[in-house]
Image (cartoon, coloured by chain):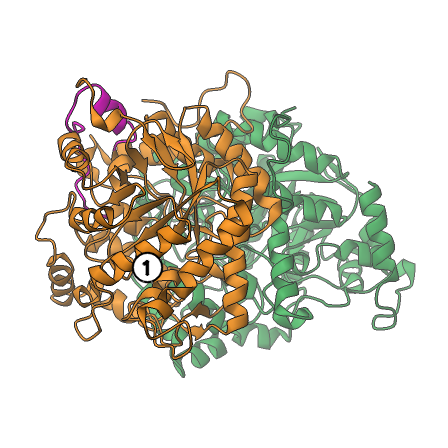
Amino acid sequence: MIDNDVIFEPLEFRNLTVKNRLFRSSLSGRFDNYDGSGTEIRINWDVKFAKGGIGAIISSNTPVHPRGLIVPNYSHIDRDELIPFYRELVSRVHEHDCRYIIQIAFSGRQRDVPGIQYAKGLSSTDKREPLHGFECERMTQAQIDEIVDAFAQGARRAREAGADGVEVHGCNGYLITQFLSSAINDRDDEYGGSLENRARFALEVVRAIRREVGDDYHVQFKISPREHMRDIYPWMGDGNTLEESVQVCKWLEEAGVDGFHVSTGGAFPHPRNPPGKMPLADLARTYDSMVSSGRHAFRNLVAFRVPPLKWTMQKWWERPLHGKYEGQTLPDAAAVKRAVDVPVLCAGGFQTASVIRSAIESGDVDGVTMARTVLANPDLPKLFAEGLDRAPRPCTYCNKCLVNFVENPLGCYDESRFESREQMIEEIMTVYDLPAYKEQGAPARTATR
Amino acid sequence: MTLSNAHVQSVAAATPGEHPPLHPARSSAIFEPLRFRNLEVKNRIFRSSVAGRFDNYDGSGTEVRINWDLKFARGGVGTIISSNAPIDARGHIIPGYAYIDSDETIPFWRELGRRIHELDCKYVVQLVFAGRERMMTGVQRWPAWSSSNRAEPINGFPATKMTVPEIQSVVRSFAGAARRAREAGLDGVELAGANGMLFTQFLSSAINDRDDDYGGSLENRARFSLEVVRAIRAEVGDDFFLGFKISPREHMRELLPWLRPGNSLEESLQVCRWLEKAGVDMLHISTGGGFPHPRNPAGRFPAREMVKTYDALISDGRHVLRNFLIFSTWPFSAGFGWWWQRPTRAFGGYEGINLADSRAVKQAVSIPVLCTGGFQTASVIAEAISSGGCDGVTIARPLVANPDLVRHFEAGRDTAPRPCTYCNKCLFNFVENPLGCYEEARFDSREEMLEQIFSVYGEPSFLAHDTPVEVA
């Protein structure tokens, strides 16, 4: 281990101290019940990363309202009766000296699978989401007020459950982006038009949370400072500029935000986030579930399956990054950091200790968040602590995990990282290795390696 | 018990008028106990194999499945036949159903059985090996074992012809699964021999194209089924309930007109006699050599509903994209719907569509015979039993619609106030969505329907996490 390694220095937010600079970013599979109640499987999932030595876990997106789900089978935080689940989850993560931050979210028009409850999403606009073609309706003032309050109540539930903080999901094209974005927001009332107006919804959410949970509770905000909409849709507006987003961050800090988490892209997925390849073969196998969901999903399915269309799609998607994935969001994070006084975290393909260390030492960021890379190697922080610069079998940024989660249990689906397909499947299924119904001393269902 | 009593009273008080009470004699046959050689059940109503994708992807069971089955036990059925439980991960029909493939699954089944028994209901596990008749391959992508190399004709799932050692390993797996059911304290097993699953793939003259000991003559085609029955008897002994579900007629040409028709009723009667001799305690009569089939579950073809969830299968079979386009494109969808409903139109309805076959089997054997097929009317069921058509009925969709159907019968009603409409929306929703009744017309509002569907998740758990799950 390197002496005085900045990666393992505690990070102090106003209301929260984390033991190191490594955060697990928002990430999970469809492990919960369809009605939004949580399961032991999600607890298993999160505990895996806590055991690996990560300083804090940011939960997967947690809908604050049943209408705000991105895909069914993610646990919600939309009613008080779910608090005991989070209490249990948090206490199990705390056992490993790891903090737990709940990402409170509302999908809006951008969803993966809408589910059976609500046909239409709520958004700043009534224009369909352009990738899959999900229908939406423009929110009324009453609906805006309802969702602002839902965010506040979600934060209150997180606090009551003993979670160490909340992260407001303000990036990647979900509802808050739909208000912030100059590419999406087409309102002519006080929630649209000028930057001040577009930021109103986000600021109302943060102020409502502060009113509900008080000043002494950790609230961080995840933002995509640049939307790069033209990376996907060359005919659209490109979205907010970095300067506009830096201004939004200043306002958010004033409104009471304790930290920023910098991502990129005004949509999800996006060629820059999660940065990596487009896994056509896996995509064609799982995207079919969505065909009946959006107006363009069938078109997309065909485009993902038929050569040479699929190769063109792939080239177009992989074009912006030219195969460089790790730390590509750092310049945006550094720009935010220069503008605010609170700590800044950055997402984007991190898995090399020296890269992370220099990002922190140069003052660009205060910590990094990782999703796919710790999914491939949940013990990555421990490997860093042992002095390794990278895991022996690093994440290949193949993005197969990303597209498999719709139909299949989330895990690393890059067969080349395993001895065999059987070994890969066995690893994926370990998330179901549950204590329930097991007789004392009975062997685990999935053989341990 | 107080819960079910309160429930009876509420049912008794509900919606008078619509269905005049039956004379008790007209439904009395339903409430006579039924005695099998190794099992006695309190009434003649069995919940047939039905569940959603409520379990874990690796085949481990969940509280949600327990909640699901408890609904029907509370509603008063005498026996629950579990949804298809794969005896080997390779034999699953679709991921998300609890397996009985290893001893590690026993504690789950024991807990499930214990909770069902508390409500004075019996529990029989249906053992399945899908073979080529699957819905989703799953991430393991195991090739489907079958009697034949030919792909399943509807979705186009490829198949590989099993070698004799492979056949023997599946026979052993069935015996092991039956032993687990017994060790878990359950009341018996039923073999999923109907509806195109692996047993059908061997039995069927339309599917089995082998030229070894397991194909050709009826005797050879029946060999696999009889070997499984004998292996189970050798494993669990003579005093454990063993049923066999069979489609006496396959009606393959009603699926696709260019297929061979499949076994005749006479052939199947012979198979039933052999099964009885080999130690089967009960025969459960279904129909159709594939699943789904126009006769099973007998009902409408909900093209719109189907397109919404059938898309999940597109990447799996060879014909699924073609089917998807047919189901989603008018007039093909209308044409297919017309074709699908031809047999039931000819029968003139849905309820009791298999009674003639059941009656024929009953006359050929001396063990009790159960019949499935749209039953939900007390007078029809009682008449079927007292006229010798069957000894009991098994019900799936009508109980999904009205889990308390038996309570309505007890209260003297001929059927539930809002009976199952045979819309078959439940059948197709289960692929992507939680199973429940999806017929909005049966509810006051969509919200009420969703509440009914989500009730399977029960109260959120984790209220008292320091209380461990009780494993008997």
Asked if residue A406 can be seen in this view, the reply is no
Q: Which residues are magenta?
A: A377-399
Give the image location of residue A138, x and y in percent: 44, 75
- Of residue B147 and residue A159, the one placed in the foreground of this image is A159
Residue B449 position within the rendered picture, expressed as x and y whole percent measured from the top left? 63, 64
Identify whether B345 is placed above or below A206: below
For this view, does B60 lie left or right of residue A275? right
Quick one: SS at disc 1? loop
Q: Characterize the local packing of mark 1: few (<14), some (14-19) or many (20 or more) Cα atoms within 10 angstroms.
A: some
> Where's residue B142, x and y in %?
31, 42
Question: Chain B rendered in what hue?
Answer: green
Residue topped by disc 1: B156
Give me the chain letter of mark 1. B
Asked where in the image residue A233 lies, by quadrant, the reply is: bottom left
Q: Chain drawn orange, letter?
A: A
Residue found 57% across the figure and 48% down from its top: B245
Q: Amino acid at mark 1?
A: Gly
Task: Indicate left or right for A292 with A77 as reference.
Answer: left
Question: In the rendered structure, does residue A139 fall within the stretch colored magenta?
Answer: no
Residue B139 appears in the picture as rendered: yes
